[in-house]
Amino acid sequence: MLRDFAKAAKPDKQEIKQRMDVELARLATNQMRVKESRVPVIVIFDGWGAAGKGSVLSKVIRDMDPRFFQVATMGGIPTKEQRRMPFHWRHFVQIPEEGQFKFFDMSWMDEVARGVFTGYLDQRAYDKRIDSINMIERQLVDNGYLVMKFFFQISKKEQRKRLDALLANENTRWRVNKQDLDENESYERYLEIYDRYLRDTNRSAAPWYIIDSKDRNWATLQVLEFLNTSIDIAIHNKGFSSPPRQNVFPLKKMPLLADIDLDKSITQEEYKKELKALRTRLRSLHNVVYRKKIPVIIAYEGWDAAGKGGNIKRVAAALDPRGYEVHPIASPEPHEKARHYLWRFWWRLPKSGHIAIFDRTWYGRVMVERIEGFCTENDWQRAYNEINEFENELIDSGAVIIKFWIQIDKQTQLDRFTERQNTPSKQWKITDEDWRNREKWDQYEAAVNEMLQKTSTTAAPWHVLESNDKRYARIRALQIIVDELERACGITEI
Amino acid sequence: MLRDFAKAAKPDKQEIKQRMDVELARLATNQMRVKESRVPVIVIFDGWGAAGKGSVLSKVIRDMDPRFFQVATMGGIPTKEQRRMPFHWRHFVQIPEEGQFKFFDMSWMDEVARGVFTGYLDQRAYDKRIDSINMIERQLVDNGYLVMKFFFQISKKEQRKRLDALLANENTRWRVNKQDLDENESYERYLEIYDRYLRDTNRSAAPWYIIDSKDRNWATLQVLEFLNTSIDIAIHNKGFSSPPRQNVFPLKKMPLLADIDLDKSITQEEYKKELKALRTRLRSLHNVVYRKKIPVIIAYEGWDAAGKGGNIKRVAAALDPRGYEVHPIASPEPHEKARHYLWRFWWRLPKSGHIAIFDRTWYGRVMVERIEGFCTENDWQRAYNEINEFENELIDSGAVIIKFWIQIDKQTQLDRFTERQNTPSKQWKITDEDWRNREKWDQYEAAVNEMLQKTSTTAAPWHVLESNDKRYARIRALQIIVDELERACGITEI
């Protein structure tokens, strides 16, 4: 988990400060809500020595009422007295009462990690500890506790730098102990141990949150956001559901829809020329895809009347009809609605060497289903991660996923709607529902922005196609498809 | 999980048949309740070849309405067509719709286990599969599915016997394939692979149930009981809680309270003699316990006026007061009630070399708290396992746990209550609450019986002390304590 840890995009200093203030105020309110709803909250800070656990902690508690939280300092070697008790004793006696927070500065991880490192715990003893840790955490959650586990991650170099700085100053030298130095010296080995531990104890009921800790304010902000969101969910569901999962997929930074320049266009002449060239290229690529047995998924989403249909038509025209299928996705049928919302898409996946084009997709969950209330807030909040996991499964099995968001502005949509209404041959294309959806443009825009931010994984990023000029968008789509397929087929030059 | 698998005590043939009929009828009703409440149910049958998955399945579905369940036959090597799709495709397309059952005859385990066996999956690839399997199962549960996973366990010898029988008959020979034979030949290696797989995929949301499959009716009954109980919970909580965990601790078969012979007694003379001898022995053992740093927990439960106080007094009298503590357990204080119900007992655990005597215990959860409604049914149902886990932690850390249930009959209680009421010096001992509890004698008896059955682990079994004659019970208690401590100290002869 640590090795391939997907760092969230770090905002700039100013934004971090602003958001931190918002979250600190939110936590102060949440502390009172926690008190009222009687949820006990355990917050665990684990991670590398000198990763900043202490300084983040002092920031997190800044606006909290000290009567209703406590800090327990664990970690290190248990005292002689503690060693006369069962392993979990010194932790368990520290659990908070209902409505209170307890911050654990280090937890039961520390003793286990040292034990593995020194060889004191062999595989069997380690497995036993893991079972016992998962058992204790499960029992806490089953009995109504919110358990939040943060791992503070820094690189070997960063750790070294911090340790050196501490050592260089007479007043801080005492804060560096032998264990910290060992950890840095054997960083790779510890990374392996921590990574395994996080994997082995990462359960839905008490998942790990890995905190990118190079910048302390940024680390604080990450902790605060996870903490506040989880408290909201715990209070809302009276402890009956799991905290949100941290995103584990590297994400591409996406622009807001409002910032997209829609003036891009192409002349009729250029369009014809490009279209012809790209079609020829795509046709021949389709053969390579087939021979190399690569499954390809092309997903279209976009505003009503943005030009999805015409765009798909131009792509399909370049393909061998025996090797592709277009799936128009409407509201789910009763037998589809009665199953996991991704089921109907699993059914429509392309086999290896084939291309599946989806006209609307599984992203309906976080757009129309969210806005029309067809699923609960829990459902669509959870869906970002579920969808990333779903696409990751497909990519792991060798698939190429190309996702398009076809973007137009509100005026262009109105023009096209009006034209459709006034043109008898196009009237079938416009329905009352289209007009109703248009009224919710702002809600949809917010949902689409959130979707683009949260599901644009580097392995399957969104491509926003500027489609005020439909022809421009078509050429862009073809170009992206050709580029992606060439990369997948290992072709570097046309 | 398979190696140290705790087989449940097998009832006799007659009882199995009777209970099976009850459970089959219950499942038929549950099928209709599932349909109404729209829960989708996935039932997975995994396990050894020839373990009887097929024949159990045909029994389980005997009384079910075939319109609302289906069987999916998985396992084996995926077809060429299936291999053109992502790993989970062939499973996921099979998921049932709301209100329906789908039985999976083998699941995604099979392909993974073969992959590890043949070396096709290395550690990295295996870890990836496990992540992906846990992800899919979690997504199903998060989206409202009840996922029940059964592993059918038989020994190498039993499997060999069954395979030979199948091979010997011309009509059944075809049912044995090379994979079954390989599995038997490399039983130890497969046991290791299955064991690891079960461990790695045993999550609260979709736990494994290991089925002792030597007897087919017994196997069927076990499956039916787990299935029905989990359906009850899923419908009751609308999918918001985990299925019950299978007991993993070996249990001692306990008699029903009604079958205990309470006529046992001891003469005054014998009593004096025995008491003196046992006291001397216990006093010297206490020193050994201290030197060997063994923590000892002696837990007393029993009817009001059964003689707990006098019994504890005789034990304590033999101990060095610097080395033991008696904890009288009353209703929890507010700060105790506000935490996990085991917390106040963690606080009172003895350190190594010390003896803690509990006058009433954590078993209040499944007696008074259950009967007086101080916790939910979910809470006390879950508590049997939580308590077994708790005691197991203590035993793992080296502790000896001795649990007494002090038993008297209803008439004896009445006699003692009346005597207390009529004796001024004893009146403080009898309260209105005692009389109120007495009125619930039958409810308590049922709860105590269930507690004795479910928490009498072989590592910390209950000892029922016949206490109509209090002196008899005292001598028995001392004798058991002496025996247990001698065993723990490695002393075989007095």
Image: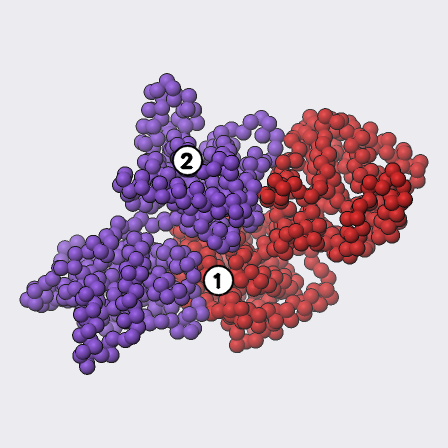
Chain colours: A red, B purple
Q: Quadrant of the N terminus of chain B?
A: top left
Q: Quadrant of residue B480?
A: bottom left
For mark 1, what is the residue? A144
Q: Is residue A50 left or right of residue A133?
A: right
- Marks 2 and 1 in Cβ contact (< 8 Å): no
Q: Nearer the viewer, residue A9 or A236?
A: A236
So how many labels did they put on this image?
A: 2
For mark 2, what is the residue? B62
Give the CA distance from mark 2 to mark 1.
Answer: 40 Å
Residue A306, percent across and down?
82, 45
Q: Are marks 2 and 1 on the same chain?
A: no
Residue located 72% across and 54% down the image: A447
| Other-residue count near label 2 (Cα within 10 Å), few / some / many at <14 / 14–19 / ≥20 | some
The circle drawn on residue A61 is none
> Is residue B340 depicted above or below B16 in this figure?
below
Residue A176, percent across and down?
53, 65
Residue located 56% across and 41% down the image: B97
Q: Is residue A285 left or right of residue B158?
A: right
Q: Is residue A337 left or right of residue A318?
A: left
Q: Nearer the viewer, residue A250 or A356?
A: A356
Element type where label 2 sits in the image: loop
Chain containing the residue with disc 2: B
Element type where label 1 sits in the image: loop
Residue B408, percent across and down?
20, 63
> Is residue A434 depicted above or below A42 in this figure?
above
Mark 1: which amino acid? Gly
Q: Quadrant of the C terminus of chain B?
A: bottom left
Give the residue at the far top of this rendering.
B170
Give the residue at the far left of this rendering.
B269
| Other-residue count near label 1 (Cα within 10 Å), few / some / many at <14 / 14–19 / ≥20 | many
